[in-house]
């Protein structure tokens, strides 16, 4: 039985996940979403552009944000969404992305938890950020 409640949540609680982005990750994500933009799958096209190589989907980072959220077990909660999502730098094949999910605010009256979410690459460069709100549902 799930007995964890909003009163048990502490500001500053956090979790993180780390994943190295492979070519297979990007192609599987493209297949699932149908997003076969040349930015992600056409090496020749991207070599002529600003980045000089293919980049991972920004929304793949959203999946990492969700996974980091799920790793920080707060009780029976659902995500109400991600706000102020920004993909601040490209993610290249072979980059290792660490996603941290940190509770920044607890609204005890509304039974909601706010979190800052941040993705950084192996060089410590921020590549994605968002704010997430989760609600207790039972």
Image (cartoon, rainbow, N blue to C red):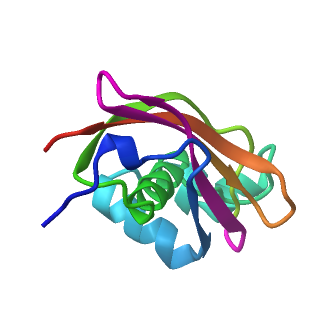
Question: In the image, residue 2 lies at what x, y percent?
Answer: 18, 62
Residue 99 covered by magenta stretch: yes
1 or 112, which lies in front?
Answer: 1
Q: Quadrant of the N terminus?
A: bottom left
Q: Residue at x 54, y 61 (%)?
A: 41
Residue 36 covered by magenta stretch: no
Q: Residue at x 49, y 77 (%)?
A: 24
1 or 98, which lies in front?
Answer: 1
Judge from the rendering whether residue 114 lies leftward or rightward of residue 104; answer left or right: left
The furthest residue to the top:
109
Q: Total marks drawn?
A: 0
Question: Magenta span covers which residues?
Answer: 93-116
Q: Quadrant of the C terminus?
A: top left
Occupied quadrant, residue 92: bottom right
Rendered position, 90 above or below 27: above
Question: In the image, residue 29 lies at what x, y percent?
Answer: 40, 63
Rendered position, 54 above or below 93: above
Question: In the image, residue 61 lies at what x, y percent?
Answer: 53, 53
Question: In the image, residue 97 lies at what x, y percent?
Answer: 67, 64
The furthest residue to the right:
123
125 or 9, which lies in front?
Answer: 9
Main secondary structure along the magenta-highlighted residues: strand
Q: Residue at x 67, y 69 (%)?
A: 93
Q: Residue at x 49, y 52 (%)?
A: 65
């Amino acid at each position: 039985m799930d007995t964890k409640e909003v009163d048990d949540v502490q500001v500053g609680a956090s979790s993180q996940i780390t994943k190295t982005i492979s070519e297979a990750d990007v192609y599987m994500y493209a297949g699932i979403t149908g997003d076969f933009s040349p930015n992600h799958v056409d090496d020749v096209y991207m070599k002529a552009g600003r980045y000089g190589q293919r980049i991972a989907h920004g929304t793949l980072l959203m999946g990492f944000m969700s996974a980091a959220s799920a790793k920080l077990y707060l009780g029976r909660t659902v995500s109400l969404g991600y706000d102020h999502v920004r993909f601040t730098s490209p993610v290249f094949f072979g980059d290792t992305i660490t996603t941290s999910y940190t509770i920044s605010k607890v609204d005890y009256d509304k039974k909601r938890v706010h979190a800052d979410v941040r993705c950084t690459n192996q060089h410590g460069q921020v590549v994605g950020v968002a704010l997430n709100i989760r609600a207790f549902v039972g």
